[in-house]
Amino acid sequence: MTTRPRALVTGASAGIGRNFAEHLARTGHDLVIVARREDRLRALAEELGAATQADVEVLVADLGDDVGTAAVADRIAAGGIDMLVNNAGYAARGRVAELDPDALDAMLRVNVLALSRLSAAAMKAMTAAGRGTIINIASGTVFMQVPGNAGYGSSKNYVMAFTRHMQIEAAGTGVRVQLLVPGVIATDFHEVAGNDIANFPPERVMQADDLVVASLRALEMDEPVCIPSLPEIRDWDNYVAAEALVAKNCSRDRPAARYHGA
Ligand SMILES: NC(=O)c1ccc[n+]([C@@H]2O[C@H](COP(=O)([O-])OP(=O)(O)OC[C@H]3O[C@@H](n4cnc5c(N)ncnc54)[C@H](OP(=O)(O)O)[C@@H]3O)[C@@H](O)[C@H]2O)c1
């Protein structure tokens, strides 16, 4: 009997996560699907089980609380997870002066803390196994500052920075780490955030299926940063090069000449 790789997908009850689950099941993976809405997870497990040969475990967990996050981290630590798709997330928006601090905390627990804990559990287990794949989902908002988006945008800046550190640490371990940077994707995300997706010009909106295909293709191509709609990957390389230029001079023994007052 051959063993099929198993992928754990968070936020698999809708949108991008559901699409990852469908693609991975069809391409020979068993699954652990995670979210809060059990009815949706069970229906998806049944559907994928019938349509593919996939064995689908349902793990109902709220990644906004420690118990739920610990249950998922424990499942990863228990072994047999070859791929983690750290996808669950949402946007709580509001200008900083008007932000509901509880809503901000709740979002950061999912977008930042849970993603970090699951990344850590997967890096540990996969490094020990000498193989594995982790996909962390940031957002194109990391490159923009928009009023009302400080909390969500910054949570995704954290995902980007954390994942880039993971990529450096994963070198030579056999673990692949992809940073996936979607633009506007046609999912329930916008409704949850209080927006109408119809407000975006259609040429800026990608289907979740196209995003997932690009992400899986980027894995095959060994492209660690997948920005699916970016025509030229050298634009990302230039962004990293500009960062390196600033970084090089961030730490010196004296302030720059313009601060030397009379
Ligand atoms: N759509 C976009 O335009 C876009 C753009 C850039 C990045 N992204 C990112 O892509 C990821 C997926 O978003 P999406 O567009 O697929 O949104 P979506 O359709 O609203 O799906 C979000 C998923 O996250 C799960 N989730 C939310 N809170 C959770 C919690 N506390 N515990 C466990 N699961 C939770 C939801 O499941 P339950 O409600 O059943 O728990 C759902 O399965 C997010 O990280 C989002 O920030 C989206």
Image (cartoon, grey):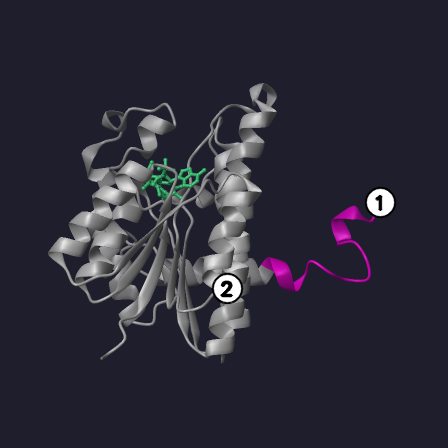
Q: Which residues are magenta?
A: 246-262
Q: Which mark is residue 261?
A: 1
Q: Residue 51 location in percent, x, y?
A: 12, 55
Q: Secondary structure at mark 2?
A: helix
Q: Are marks 2 and 1 in contact (CB under 8 Å)?
A: no
In this rendering, position of residue 51 left or right of residue 182: left
> Main SS of the magenta segment?
loop
Give me the residue at 54% from left, 53% from top. 116
Task: List x then y, in percent, for residue 260.
Answer: 82, 49
- The quarter of the image that holds ligand 1 is top left
Instruction: Note whether ligand 1 is within 8 Å of mark 2.
Output: no
Residue 256 in view: yes
The answer to whether residue 227 is above or below residue 150 is below
Q: Indicate which disc, 2 or 1, sits on the residue closer to the N terminus.
A: 2
Label 1, secondary structure: give it. Answer: loop
State the mark number for residue 159.
Answer: none
Q: Residue at x 51, y 76 (%)?
A: 128
Q: Which residue is the extreme one toward the top?
A: 98
Where residue 172 appears, as percent x and y from the top left, is: 49, 80
Q: Amino acid at mark 2?
A: Ala
Residue flagged by tag 1: what amino acid is it? Answer: Gly
**Which sits in the foreground, 249 or 233?**
233
Query: What crowding class fits label 2: few (fewer than 14 Cα within 10 Å), some (14-19), or many (20 or more)?
Result: some
Q: As drawn, which residue projects farthest toward the left? A: 51
Determine which of the numbered discs, if any, sits on residue 77 in the image: 2
